[in-house]
Image (cartoon, rainbow, N blue to C red):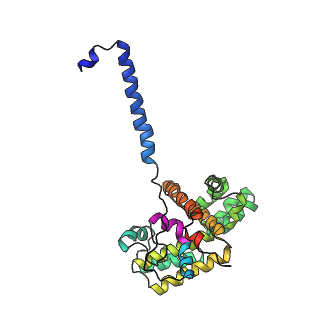
Amino acid sequence: MQMFENLPWYSYILLVLAIASYAYRYFKIGKKEYDAPDLTDARFKKASNSDLSEEQRFAIALYTPISEWWGADTNTLTFLNAKEIKPYLEGWWIDTPEGYWGLTEYFMKDGRRWYFDFIYPMVQKEPEEQWGRLMDEKFGDNERAHRFLEFLRTGEVSDTLKQKGILLFDSELELGVAGYDAAILVGQARKAYTAGLISEKDAWKVIHFAKALALQHFSSWEEFGKSFAIGFFLDMKSDYNPHKEQIYHVYKQVMEHPDSPWNTLDWPR
């Protein structure tokens, strides 16, 4: 402490200011960096013993943005291991065969298309004063339906996805969310198979349904990818914003990287 005793009075003021500046940087800027999402780099891993056909690998690739976030192989039906995917299955309430098939049948029949295919045309064509009545008649107090309406009414979905470079025009919302539904079907089938909830035969049955759904609605990976991103944005609550940022980061790599399945597997003509 003796080293400070002979300093001029104004040096103490400078010292206090320096300490305050450091504290600000540590607690404000440092915390901001700490709270920033840990963005994932896509690796497009391939198992050496894969025996999947190109058609099967194409169908598996529908889930690529999320499977890359998990770090799963791009050429296997299995998805990591049962222990790692258990929290996902529990979070979606599909950790039993009954739970899995209940949600899968919903996604095959309706999925998030049920919401979007009603709400988006309504916002585009119906007078706003009619929206409340129409929403009540169709969805009641369904929380997800009203979240879809809020994102579409305010333009938040298109504004955000344009900012991320995923969409170019508002009109691309017309692509809908079938791409998202197809992707979820593939991902959940892979995870359910890995957990031993369904057979390999049943897993491929669901995955091929998802492939047919995608081919029915889209003519390229670009169209499919945009639809996936629209559905992902609409389906995730604001609480999941850090997760959204991670998926957008991976999505860009999936679209652009030469090793991505979306660039090595042709969209069927």
Question: Which residue is drawn at the image coordinates 28% and 13% (left, top)?
Answer: 6
The answer to whether residue 29 is above or below residue 116 is above
Is 40 situated above or below 192?
A: above
Query: As rendered, which of 141 and 12 lies closer to the eye?
Result: 12
On the image, the x and y values in percent for residue 126 come to 75, 61
**Which picture quadrant has residue 198?**
bottom left
Question: Considering the image in quadrants, where does the C terminus appear?
Answer: bottom right
Task: Report the residue at 55% width, 71% height from top.
Answer: 261
**Residue 210 visible in rendering:** yes
Q: Does the magenta stretch include residue 169?
A: no
The magenta span reads 62-70
Q: Which residue is drawn at 63% across and 70% down?
A: 221
* Picture coordinates of residue 218, whole percent (x, y): 67, 73
Residue 73 location in percent, x, y? 46, 72
Chief secondary structure of the magenta span?
Answer: helix
Q: Which residue is at the front of the view, 99 or 126?
A: 99
**Quadrant of the image for the N terminus?**
top left
Q: Position of residue 145 (x, y in %)?
A: 60, 63
In the shown orientation, is residue 161 left or right of residue 193?
right
